Amino acid sequence: MKRLAAALVLALFLSGDVLCGGWGVLGGVGTILFPYLWFYLVIESLSEKGRIKDGQLFLLAGSFSFLYEGIFTKRMQSGLSVTGLDWAAILSGPFEWGMIAVVWFHCLEALVPRRKDVERSFWRRAAIVLIFVGAVLVYLWKTTYGHYRIQNMLGPLWLLDDILLAGAAWGMWRLFRKSSAESFEQRPLWIWGLAGVGLWISGAGLLAQIYSGYPSSLLASALQGLWLGGVAWLLRSCWQRRGLSAETVRRSRPIFVAAGFRVVGILLLLLIFGTDWDMRKVFWSGVLCRLPALVFFYSAFLTSRLEV
């Protein structure tokens, strides 16, 4: 029970839900059950056969992002494109969830290590099925009664979006299944490419908010150029340090620093801005929480294997 309680509290802070929904999120049954309790039980169930690799967890969380952020909550649909897909969210979402999951379980292992004599649990598996069935029923209820804003904006195209996002989830799930037979000593090249894209999108969006009030395109080009150069330098530095250690890292300082930026940053913003909705919180959460955490996470994830 201690591990479960620590996992749920840590997940709500690392995901940023406490910042978005205030302290009431800690008692929100719906949010606790799906996605966090459900996802935690899935990982614990998979770990019955042995420790899950950080690369596998990263892919599994990416698959789950399409299921939760894409289909269930529709956060990957904006209505601005022809079909309504938000391509920035689609490109960065799986990596955001992958980061959260790996940081989450790496820190959880440090706080409350998993018992070595984990046995198969019928109740755990039953809870996974019941929670997932409940989430499907909520999705069908919201769809039937038109509770999704994007559903009303796009008309029948919302169904096409859901099908495409389900296909993306299935594709990443297959990568997860395939990864169980791989060593993951070094990350595939496509991980490096998408990591760079996801990191660049996150910083570029924050910079766009900074110079949005200035008419000069020179300032915009200079800031974006510097950020792009910084991302390229980080990836090059990580590439030079990749695979230097074949041993699994049990205590990664960059990962703990990434978690610290998320948790401390959220507490600081809640202290300054309170729990009410404020656009300034969106910007400063990116500056104080999300972007620094991504930089430290990728520097650890791309250069070593993390024990989760």
Image: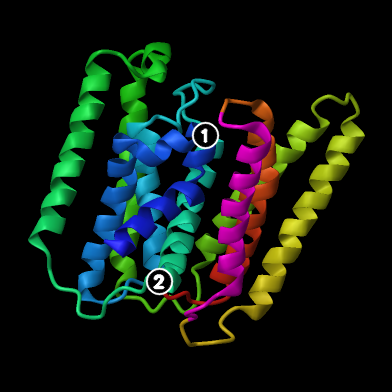
Q: Name which residue lies at 27% across and 21% down.
A: 142
Other residues around mark 1 within 10 Å, as few (<14) / some (14–19) / many (≥20): some
* Secondary structure, magenta segment, majority class: helix
Write down the region rendered in magenta. Answer: 249-275
Percent across and percent down for residue 30 are 30, 35
Q: Is residue 137 above or below residue 125?
A: above
Q: Is 82 in front, or is 139?
A: 139
**Quarter where residue 233 is shown:** bottom right
Percent across and percent down for residue 68 are 35, 39
Q: Is 173 in front, or is 287?
A: 287
Quick check: is 268 in the magenta stretch? yes
Q: Is 188 in front, or is 204?
A: 204
Q: Is residue 55 above or below residue 223?
A: below
Disc number placed over residue 20 in the picture, else none: 1
Mark 1 residue type: Cys
Considering the image in quadrants, where does the C terminus appear? bottom left
